[in-house]
Image: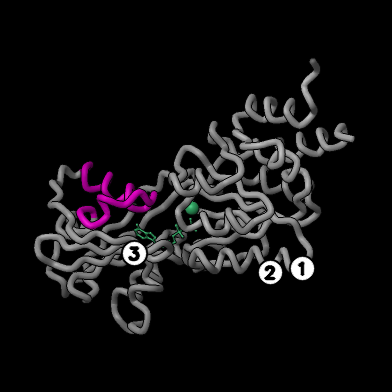
Amino acid sequence: ATMPPLLSAIANAGRHGVLVKSAVVMERLGQIDAVALDKTGTLTEGTPKVTDIRPLPASGLTEDALLRLAAAAEHPSEHPLARAVVDAARNRDLDLPPAEDFASAPGTGVTARVDGKKLAVGSPARLLDGRDDHPAAALAEQLESEGRTAVAVLVDGAPVGVLGIADRLRDEATTTVTALTALTGTAPVLVTGDNPRAAARLADEVGIADVRAGLLPQDKVAAVKELETAGRKVLVVGDGVNDAPALAAAHTGIAMGRAGSDLALETADAVVVRDELATIPAVVALSRRARRLVV
Ligand code: ADP
Ligand code: MG
């Protein structure tokens, strides 16, 4: 028998390295007319590296001591920033004490008890909220204006230092944004939990004008709902636990497979298995062709 067009399209998508979970999804992909893209792990490679280790002088901590505490707290986390911090500690041969009472808050960071101290590691905007005049806030702002993601480290509630982390833009990020813009008639929207300064720099580089930064998972959902209320059928592309609610709320959700969290992979309608962003516009085009063949 000849394969029905949507099933052939699924097989074809598979050859492109995209796992489309059902014929319904294959069909819906061709209906999208707006795109919301996550930043870290989606437009960027998702293997960020620690570039700056800045203990505050008042903390009395060395670079290694700051990194060791942060890495110990981050160890249980699957977030790409957490992996960057742990890798940096490993590169310096620091041995990490165990983390107790670990908890993570998507879009914010992690907390844990390390060496009997209460550690908090994460977004300066959240962890230093209301302490704009603290030296740690100035340090974070400086790193962010250089395009870094700044990560604040707090011990027993007091800021002790900031880490700077940078991730490479994917080679195919700009061409993918251009292709999605051509397919939908509007440039994608950037929806990110990262800081506005780093987000704006990257958006500029890839040709995105609409930037929503500092978003929590529910804010990403609100951004999608806003577009859908305006009559758009939104494709969300993301990789993190923080993207899962938006992936679920969207008309269609695609997760980046390699760096993607299990929750994002399970929630999404399709998964980019081969880690090539450019396969996304290709699969949308495939769906549109298949739909024209379905009577
Ligand atoms: P994005 O939407 O760009 O993928 P996330 O929502 O995953 O970013 O993260 C947003 C922000 O939350 C990060 O830039 C960081 O400041 C903070 N954050 C989240 N998880 C962690 C973590 N495990 N360690 C440090 N910072 C974190
Ligand atoms: Mg992400």
Label 1, residues with CA under 10 Å away: few <14, some 14-19, many ≥20? few
Which label is found at residue 230? 1
Question: Which contiguous range is marked in magenta?
Answer: 71-91
Q: Is residue 242 left or right of residue 100?
A: right
Give the residue type that dot 1 points to: Ala
In this rendered view, identify the residue nearer to me: 293 or 70.
293
Which label is found at residue 226? 2
Sequence-wise first label, 3 or 1: 3
Q: Are marks 2 and 1 in contact (CB under 8 Å)?
A: yes
Q: Is residue 79 magenta?
A: yes
Look at the picture and state if 16 lies above or below 76: above
In this rendered view, identify the residue nearer to me: 216 or 158.
216
Q: Which quadrant holds the N terminus?
A: top right
Q: CA distance from mark 3 to mark 2?
A: 28 Å
In this rendered view, identify the residue nearer to me: 156 or 57.
156
Give the quarter of the image for residue 293. Answer: top right
Give the residue type that dot 3 points to: Gly
- In percent of width and height, residue 201 lies at 55, 60
Dominant secondary-structure state across the stretch colored magenta: helix
Q: Is residue 195 visible?
A: yes
